[in-house]
Image: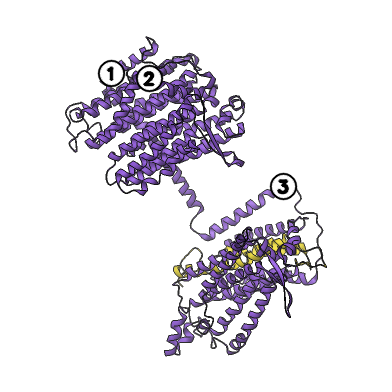
Amino acid sequence: MIIALIPLLPLAGSIIPFLFSSRSHHAAAAGCVAGVSLILLLAQAPAVFAGQMPIHSWQWIPAIGLNFAFRISGFGFLVACLILGIGLLIILYARYYLSTEDPMGRFYAYLLLFMGSMLGIVLSENLILLMMFWELTSISSFLLIGFWTHRADARQGARMALIITGGGGFAMLAGFILLGHIVGSFELTDILASKEQVQGHHLYAVTLVLILLGAFTKSAQFPFQFWLPHAMAAPTPVSAYLHSATMVKAGVFMLALMFPVLSGSALWFYLVAPVGLVTLVFAAYMAMFKDDLKGLLAYSTVSHLGLITLLLGLGSPLAAVAAVFHLFNHAMFKAGLFMLSGIIDHEAGTRDMNRLSGLWKYMPVTATLTMAGCAAMAGIPMFNGFLSKEMFLAQTLKPNLFGDQAWIIPLGATLASIFAVAYSIRMIHEVFFNGPATDMDKQPHEPSRGMRLPAEILMALCLLVGIFPAVLAGPMVNAAAQSILGPEMPEFTLSLWHGFNLALAMSAIAIIGGIVVFKFRRYLFDSHIWFSRYCDGKAIFETVTDWLIQSGYRLNQAVFNSSLQRYMALLIISVIVLGSSPFWRSETKFLGTATMTAIDPVTFIMGIILILCALATVITHRNRILSIIMLGTVGLIVSLTFSRFSAPDLALTQISVETVTIILLMMALFMLPRNSPKDSSRYRRQRDVLLAGLAGGGAGALAMGILTRPYETISDFFLAQSVPGGGGTNVVNVILVDFRGFDTLGEITVLAIAGLAIYALLHNFEIEAPQTDALGRPWTSDRFPMILANITRPLLPLALLFSAYIFLRGHNEPGGGFIAGLITAAALILQYIASGIVWTRPRLNFDNHIVMAWGLIVALVTGLCSWVFHYPFLTSTFTYVSWPWIGKFELASAIVFDLGVFLVVVGSVMLILVKLGAVNSPDAQTVSTLAQHHPDLEPEKEMF
Amino acid sequence: MELLISACLGVMIACGVYLLLRARTFSVVLGLILMSFAVNFFLFITGRLHTDLPAIISPDRSIYADPLPQALVLTAIVIGFAMTAFVVVLALRAGRELETDHVDGKPEKTQ
C-alpha cells in the first residue's frame, strides 16, 4: 500500500499547487508532496538494504495481464531517491528561477505529474503499468519543455521530443507485448527470471530491437540524439531535472532493468555497445562546439548516457556496477551544472559563451561551484565523476566480442574523455575568465540564497562521494547492482585510489590531451563548420517530417477534393470491394441448403409493384413531387410485406412512420425547388448505374444467401419467458419495454436528441416561400378546404381514442408506445394541415419539448423505481386486477415505461413537424395579431 | 418466395445507391429513405420468412416468428424517421445558407 503511494502521491498531488495563489505557497505545496513521498521511500530503506524487494499488487484487468503492482528493487530505490531528492532541490530552485509572469501553479503541477510518472516507471512491477507511466513521462515532459508556450523554439523542441520519445515508446510497447507473450506474464518478477526462455525464443531478436528502440529514443542515443539539445528551450529547472536525473535516465534505466533477461547474447552486445560508443564519442565531440551553455551541457549529457549504454552493452557484471554508479554520479553533477548555468543566465542575462566573459569578478561562489561540477564532469580525481569513469575505463580494456578490433572501445573512451576535459575547461574559461566582462545586458551579481542552495548541496555531495565513496554511495550502489545482477554479483570496492594501472594512465592521457585540445581548439572549430553543414539531426528530422506532411497533403488532395458526391462514390466503391472480397476465394457454396417456400400470386404482384415503384422513384427523381408519391408507395408495400410475414407491429410502425415521413418531405419540398436540374453527364450516370447495380446485386445475393440457410435463434428465451417473466403475450413489445428496456431507453434518448438538434437547426430560420408558381398563378385558391377542416376536427377524439386503445393493448396484441405515439402525432398534425398553424397552435396549447422531456423522465424514473426494491435497473413487475364490468385486467410496470416511450415519440415528432411548418410563418402569435388588423395578410403569411 | 424478396431488396438498395450519388440534396434524401427501407427489411428477414406466425403467445400454437429482429427493426424505423428529418432539415438549412441545393454547394448556373 505504502509503495503504491510513493508514485501516486505526486500524481494526485499535481492538482494541489492550483489550490494556492501565492508563489511561495505553490513551491511549498509541491515540496510537501515530494517530501512526503521521499519519507515514504526512505522508510523502505532498511528492507531494501537487507536485500529484500517489497511488492504490492492489486488485480486490475487480469484478462490482459494488467495488475496494479509496485515493487522496490535496490536499483529502483536508487533511481527513486535521485528522482525525489533532486526533484525537491529543483522545486526550491524553480521558486527563485521563474519570473513573476510565469504561471507558477501550472509549472509545479506539471513537475509533480512528471515526478509521479518517473517514480511509476522505476517502481512498477507490471510491464503494462510501467508502459503507462512511460507514456505519461512523454506527455508531461512535452508540457514542461513547451512550458513557455509563447516561444516558437520551445513549442518545436517539445513537439520533437514528444514525436521521438513517443514513437520509441510505441515500439517499446510492442516489445513488451512480445516479451509478455514469450514469458506468459507481464510481471517483472516472472520476466526477469526467464532469461533462457526469452533468449531461446525465435522472437527474441524482434523483441530486443523494439525495446532498445524505446530505450535509445528516450535516452537520446545515436541516431536519435538530436531531440535533446532542442529540448533546452525549456526553462532551466526543467532541463536540470529532465536531462540530468530523470527523463533521459529512463532509457538507461530500462536497459539496466532488462539487463538480467535480455543481455548476455551476442546480439545485445552488437546492438547496444556500438550505439553507446558512437553516442559517447560523437556527443562529446559536438559538445566542444556549442556556444550555448545549456547546449554544451545537453551534448555532454548525451555523451554520458552513451557511456552508461556502452557499459551496459559490454555486459560484464562489473560493467553493470559501473553503469549504476555512473548513473548516480552523473545525475548529481549534471543537475548541479544545469542549475548553475541557469543562475548565470538569470544573473548575467545570457548563456551565450561568445558574449559571456570575466564573471569570476562578479560571482566567485557560483564560479567555484561550476568548477567543481565541471571537474566531476571531466573526471578529475577527488570528484565522484572520476570514480565511475575510472571503473568505466577499466571495463573498456576487458576483451570483448569485437575480437581483434576490441581496441576501438578504449580508443573511443579515451577520445571522449579528452573531449570531456576540453569542453569542461572551455566552459569555465569562457564564462568566468577570458578577459573582462563586456557584452552584458545587466550588471552580473551572485544569485539569491535559495537559488544557489540546491547547487551547493549537489556540489558538496559530488565532492564528498568523490572522497568517501564507500561510505556514502557504497550501500546504495551495492543494493542496486545486487538487484540487477543477483547471484552474478561481483566483488568490488568503491575507493578513491586503485593504484597505478592502465585506467589511471588513460585518465591522465585524457586530462593532458584535453588541455592540448583546448589550446588548439581553433583548428578544430574551423573543421567543424564543414561538418555541421552536412550533419544536422534537426534538419534531417525536419526534412523527413516536412516530406511526410507534404505527401499526406498531396494524398489528401488526390482523394478528397471537397466534393461530397465523390466521397459518396468512393465510400460505396470501398463498401462493394470490402464486402465482396471475402467471397472471392471462399470455398463454401454461396447458397444454403434450406428449401425455398412457394410463391403466392398476391405476394408476387406486390413484389413486382414494389420493384416498379422503386425504379419509378429513380426515373422520376427530377420531378420531385412525383418521386415522393412513388417512394410513398414503396413504403406502403414494405409495411404490407411486414404484415404478410408475421410482423404486425412492424407493419403498424412502418405505415405510421411512412405517413409522417411523406408529410415531412412535402413540407421540405415547399421550400426547395420543385424539380432537379440535369446535372450528371452521361458518363457519370453510367458509372452510377454500374455502382448501384453492383451494390444492389450484392445486397440481394447476400439476402439470398441468408434466406437459404437454416438458422438458430436466441429468441426461444424471449418466447418462453414473455408471459411468465414479462406478463405480456406480444413478445415484440415485451422485448422492447422489458427484456431490452435499457436499449429502448437509449433509443428514445436518441430520438429526443434528434428532435432537439432539428429544433436548433431551425432556430432563427425563415424562408420567404414563393406565393405563386413559375407562371404567376397562386398556389391554391383554397388553402384550408372547409370539408377537410370540418371532417378532421371531430376525427381527432376518435383518433386519440384509437391510439389509446393501441397503446393499452400493446403488451398483449400488436401495438404499444411507439405505434400509439406515431398515430397520435399523425392525428394532431392532421389538424395543423387542415386548419393551419395559426388556428391550431393556440388550441393544442402544449409545449412539445416538455412532452418529450416528461417522456424521458417517466421512462427513467420507472427504471430507477426498481432500485428502491433492490432490483436491477428497469426490472419490471406486473399483477392482475379484477375491475367491475371490464373483468380481469393486467397492470404492468412496463406500461408506465411504455408511456414514457409514447410521450417521447409524440413530443419529438410534433416538435420536428410543427417547427418545420412554422418556418414559413415565424411566429404564429404575431401573425394572428397582425391578421386582426390586416385580414388579407393571414392567408399569405402561413402555409398550414 | 426467397428469390422475390431478395430481388426486392436488391432493387431497393440499387435505387437507393443511385439516388445517393445524385447531385441534389433532395435526391440524396430520397435515396437515404429507400436505403433505410432496405436495411430495415434486411434486418427483418434475418429472422427468415414466416407466414401467419406472429410472435404473440397463444395456447393454440407452439411455433412463432422470430421476435428479436422485429423488436430491433421497430425502433430502427422510428429512429430512421428522426434521422431522415434531421437530414432534411440539414439540407434545408444548407440550401438556405449556400443559396443552392447542390450537395457540393456549387452555385447555380445563371441562365
Say what secondary structure mark 1 lies in. helix
Image check: A812 left or right of A623? Answer: right
Question: For the residues carrying marks 1 and 2, which lies nearer the camera in this image?
Answer: 2
In primary-sequence order, the first of circles 3 and 2 is 2
Tell me what residue is drawn at x 44 percent, y 36 percent: A118
* Residue A620 x/y as whole percent: 61, 72
Colour in which the image shows chain B: yellow
What amino acid type is highlighted by mark number 2?
Pro
Q: Which residue is mark 3?
A: A586
Question: For the residues carrying marks 1 and 3, which lies nearer the camera in this image?
Answer: 1
Residue A517 higher or lower than B64, as above or below: above
State the purple chain: A
* Residue A707 x/y as whole percent: 75, 58
Q: Are marks 3 and 2 on the same chain?
A: yes
In primary-sequence order, the first of circles 1 and 3 is 1
- Residue found at the very far top of the displayed protein: A500
- Of A340 and A349, nearer the camera is A340
Q: Which residue is mark 2?
A: A469
Q: Chain of mark 3?
A: A
- Report whether residue A148 is seen: no
Residue A289, quarter of the rendered image: top left
Question: For the residues carrying marks 3 and 2, which lies nearer the camera in this image?
Answer: 2
Say what secondary structure mark 2 lies in. helix
Q: Which residue is mark 1?
A: A515
Image check: A79 left or right of A369? Answer: right
- Report whether residue A920 is seen: yes
- Of A392 and A624, nearer the camera is A392
Q: Chain of mark 2?
A: A
Q: CA distance from mark 1 to mark 2?
A: 27 Å
Q: CA distance from mark 3 to mark 2?
A: 72 Å
Tell me what residue is drawn at x 47 percent, y 85 percent: A940
The reply to whether the C-beta atoms of the residues labelled 1 and 3 are less than 8 Å apart is no
